[in-house]
Image (spheres, rainbow, N blue to C red):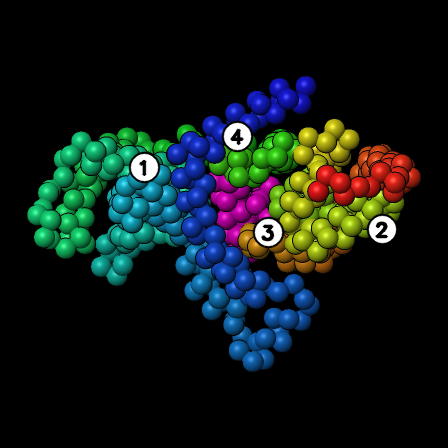
Amino acid sequence: MFAGLENTMGRVAERLSTNKVLVAIRDGFLVGTPLIIVASIFLVIANFPVPGYSDFMAQFFGKGWENSMDAVIDSTFSILAVLGAVGIGYSYAKQLESDAIAGGVLSLVCYLIMTPKVHPAFVNEAGKKFTGFAFSNLGSAGVFLAMITAIVSVKIFVTIQKKGWVIKLPDAVPPAVYHSFAALIPSAFAMFFAFAIYLIFSLTEFQYAQTFIYKVLQAPLMGFGQSVFFEPLYQFLSTLFWFFGINGPAVTNTVFNPIHLILTNENLEAFKAGQPLPNIFTGPFGDFFGNFGGGGSTLSLVFLMVFLAKSERMKKLGKLALIPGIFGINEMVTFGLPVVLNPIILIPFLLTPLVNITLATLATMWGIIPYTTGASLPWTTPFFFSGWLSTGSIVAGFFQIFLIILGCLIYFPFFKALDKQYLKEEEGASMLTGDELDDVDLNDLSFDDL
């Protein structure tokens, strides 16, 4: 049974992980991840969840000191679509073995061509409409337009290049000049295409491509992201891939990450505006309340191995895996225990993340723990601190501890069965070694054949 399912999952994972468009989208968003994490640090500094902290800081930096942090926060979270356009364009051009930098820049320009610029609600002293890009259009609302624009513009660029429709210069011309002129005609095709789309939508009721994509594509997907099935499905599929030795998030994030990213950013925008937070299933929520110690929430299993295991194999492995597990790294357990293709561990490995995410969802809905604020902490942030800082409430940190203890209870009967099996194997190996030594006859030793 496992062999057939393993082959099926392997084929699915291979198709998703080798699809150039999906890989470009996944890797493209990763380009902005370091910037988002740094901006999240500024967000945490401005809203550190300790009573009296803001007043204490105001004594040194003046009233409203936290507003200065917006210079960094707005320059990252509020241009999420811009970062996506550049990153995806760069990644896709690289996938197609073309000029990656040209692909990233071209994607950005084509995206901006189709992004709304006129804002009738704002006028200057002369009564003229304000023209320019608003953060509201460059953030989460424009992410899907950025994704589509990056893929289409780079595809046009590479297609024209491969047809040979480029300006060719002598070999003596410096490479930088040569490549810039070689990109001229392909870039022109892509930009004219973006402009044509802009003109077409200006004649419709939508006016802008962004409005159309948001209503037709992004809004329904966000509705799915807000449904009760979204996060459990993500956790289940990611964990199932891990069971077959495939990096689950590396596969599932090609589909789920854009939705997580938008939901997270919507919470951040609401948090900054002092409005109710709209989304439970953000990226940090899935990272910090679904799994502890890596896929399958194996930190609970590691604690059992350290404190309750009788077999030397599980004791030693547990001690080695404990520190990495606290920081969300569990390959040592996944492949060393192993968890991969281990039928004894399959049930708790799949069940524990689902129980965690379900209880965390209910706890959020019932007001026991707050919604995540949108701060994107590193996924290696240890439990308790990740819950506390991602929600601004220390209660969330204690709730994480509760989930880990509950995970220990879920894993316990299966852990005992596996530990008993390994203990028997160790005892059998020990007896076999002893019997083999008893059978050795020193009279049989001879140097005659040397």
- Residue at 28% across / 30% down in the picture? 204
The magenta stretch spans which residues?
Answer: 257-284
- Residue at 58% across / 35% down in the picture? 246
The residue to which callout 1 is attached is 96
- For the residues labelled 4 and 1, the Cα–Cα distance comes to 20 Å
Image spot of residue 233 (x, y percent): 62, 31
- For the residues labelled 4 and 3, the Cα–Cα distance comes to 22 Å
**Disc number placed over residue 206 in the picture, else none:** none
Element class at badge 1: loop
In this view of the protein, which residue sits in the foreground, 257 or 307?
A: 307
- Residue at 30% across / 46% down in the picture? 100
- Left or right for 324, reference 92: right
Q: Residue furthest bottom?
A: 60
- For the residues labelled 1 and 2, the Cα–Cα distance comes to 51 Å
> Do labels 1 and 2 touch, CB within 8 Å?
no
The residue to which callout 3 is attached is 379
**Disc number placed over residue 307 in the picture, else none:** 2
- Density class for disc 3 (Cα within 10 Å; few <14, some 14-19, many ≥20) is some
Q: Nearer the viewer, mark 4 or mark 3?
A: 4
- Left or right for 117, reference 274: left
Question: Image quarter for residue 384?
Answer: bottom right
Q: Earlier in the sequence, mark 3 or mark 1?
A: 1
Q: Amino acid at mark 3?
A: Trp
- Residue 269 among those drawn in magenta: yes
> Do labels 4 and 1 touch, CB within 8 Å?
no
Question: Image quarter for residue 212?
Answer: top left
Q: Earlier in the sequence, mark 4 or mark 1?
A: 4
Element class at badge 3: loop
Indicate whether 163 appears above or below 73: above
If the image is split into quadrants, where does the N terminus sit? top right
Q: Earlier in the sequence, mark 4 or mark 2?
A: 4
